[in-house]
């Protein structure tokens, strides 16, 4: 959290307006400009953004949503909340991202949406996924919780799919304490999302200056709106976002160079038409337990960050076989520190530990 947030945050705290108000509108406008999109709907969590996207996609009881097991459980909890079922697609074990080929095989008349998670920030194969979605006349939803600052075919993530969901939770690339945002491709979906995030009501309706509660509520909504405290933090964080993303990417480039030719530790694969923001830097370690212990002894934290969701009992109804990519990736994936907060000395320490582990097998 930058110290520079305090003056604006104090002004908001004592302004008499700490719910959704002018600071939320400012954050939406500035984030939209940064992403290169005409409109952003700010909400209180990335999970709320996913829930809204699924609701807008028409997902309901008995429907199916195709998704990847390799993500946070927050990706899939809203699917269950809406009474639908997750259908697991396999992943590419060298990117951690959902397999277009398996998605195409899993689509049926019951499929209402495709959920694509950009693992670590590396964009999925969006062009191909959109083609599958169009063939079945269903929306593509991007869970971009890892991907703020990533770009695909020259445009930032946020510009491509029917719905794009961001998270501003405590440890994301940009934090508002907690919060999220939804970008809708269709203007009508954007307008509907704004109503749904606050009980189905317009916050500032035309013709209801005296009492906005007099509006006719045609569709029940939620209490998903962002407040001005979170938005004030978000506006200040945006000032640092370009520099922070650049540092993540610079650290990742160093690791890419160091790991080239390693056998025990292998980086994930990149593509020339996309660039990861590298919220995570994930590698595949053939001896993961030994690697984690080695890094711990060197004073370096490592983490799997998320585990495959299909093993959770709550998704028993979605159990399936044939997820070979998930099996391979889940057995070896581990992430090392890559964040903007690392000093040059920190990065050098991590690089030395990586080399020591590789050379120990020689």
Image (cartoon, rainbow, N blue to C red):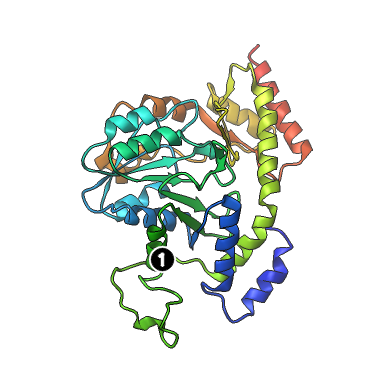
Vertical relation: 24 (above or below) 132: below
Q: Position of residue 31 (x, y in %)?
A: 58, 57
Give the left or right position of residue 148, taking residue 211 as reference.
Answer: right
- 222, 321: nearer the viewer: 222
Mark 1 residue crowding within 10 angstroms, few (<14) / some (14–19) / many (20+): many
Q: Position of residue 97 (x, y in %)?
A: 45, 33
Query: Residue at (52%, 74%) from the top-left corner?
Result: 19
Query: Residue at (64%, 28%) from the top-left corner?
Result: 294
- 32, 299: nearer the viewer: 32
Disc 1 is placed on an element classified as: loop
Give the left or right position of residue 52, taking residue 175 as reference.
Answer: left
Give the left or right position of residue 169, taking residue 52 as reference.
Answer: right
Q: Position of residue 310 (x, y in %)?
A: 34, 38
| Image quarter in which the C terminus is found | top right
**Residue farthest to the top, as pictured:** 362
Can you tell which quarter of the image residue 348 is in?
top right
- 10, 316: nearer the viewer: 10
| Image quarter in which the N terminus is found | bottom right
What residue would you read off at disc 1?
197
Query: Residue at (57%, 51%) from the top-left corner?
Result: 35
Tell me if residue 17 can be seen: yes
- 299, 65: nearer the viewer: 65
Q: Position of residue 265 (x, y in %)?
A: 59, 22
Vertical relation: 305 (above or below) 13: above
């Amino acid at each position: 959290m930058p110290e520079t947030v305090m003056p604006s945050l104090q002004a908001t705290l004592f302004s008499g307006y700490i719910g959704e108000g002018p600071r939320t509108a400012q954050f939406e406008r500035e984030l939209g400009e940064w992403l290169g999109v005409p409109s952003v709907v700010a909400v209180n969590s990335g999970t709320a953004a996913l829930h809204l996207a699924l609701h807008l996609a028409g997902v309901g009881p008995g429907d199916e949503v195709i998704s990847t097991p390799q993500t946070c459980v927050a990706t899939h909890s809203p699917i269950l909340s809406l009474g639908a079922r997750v259908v697991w697609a396999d992943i590419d074990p060298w990117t951690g991202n959902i397999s277009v080929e398996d998605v195409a095989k899993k689509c049926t008349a019951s499929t209402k949406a495709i959920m694509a998670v950009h693992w670590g920030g590396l964009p999925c194969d969006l062009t191909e996924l959109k083609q599958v979605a169009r063939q079945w006349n269903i929306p593509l939803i991007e869970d971009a919780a890892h991907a703020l600052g990533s770009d695909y075919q020259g445009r930032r993530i946020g510009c491509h799919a029917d719905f794009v969901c961001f998270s501003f939770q405590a440890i994301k690339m940009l934090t508002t304490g907690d919060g999220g945002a939804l970008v809708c491709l269709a203007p009508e979906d954007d307008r509907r999302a704004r109503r749904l995030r606050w009980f189905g009501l317009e916050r500032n309706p035309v013709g209801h200056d005296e009492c906005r509660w007099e509006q006719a509520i045609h569709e029940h909504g939620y209490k998903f709106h962002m407040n001005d405290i979170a938005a004030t933090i978000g506006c200040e964080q945006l000032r640092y976002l370009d520099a922070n993303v650049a540092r993540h990417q610079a650290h990742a480039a160093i690791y890419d160079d160091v790991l080239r030719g390693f056998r025990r530790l292998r980086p994930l694969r990149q593509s020339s038409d996309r660039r990861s923001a590298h919220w995570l830097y994930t590698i595949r370690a053939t001896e993961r337990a030994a690697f984690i212990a080695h890094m711990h002894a060197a004073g370096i934290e490592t983490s799997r960050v998320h585990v495959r969701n299909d093993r959770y009992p709550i998704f028993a109804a979605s159990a399936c076989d044939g997820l070979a990519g998930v099996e391979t990736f889940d057995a070896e994936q581990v992430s090392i520190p890559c964040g903007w907060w690392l000093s040059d000395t920190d990065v050098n320490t991590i690089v030395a530990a990586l080399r020591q582990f590789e050379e120990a097998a020689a």
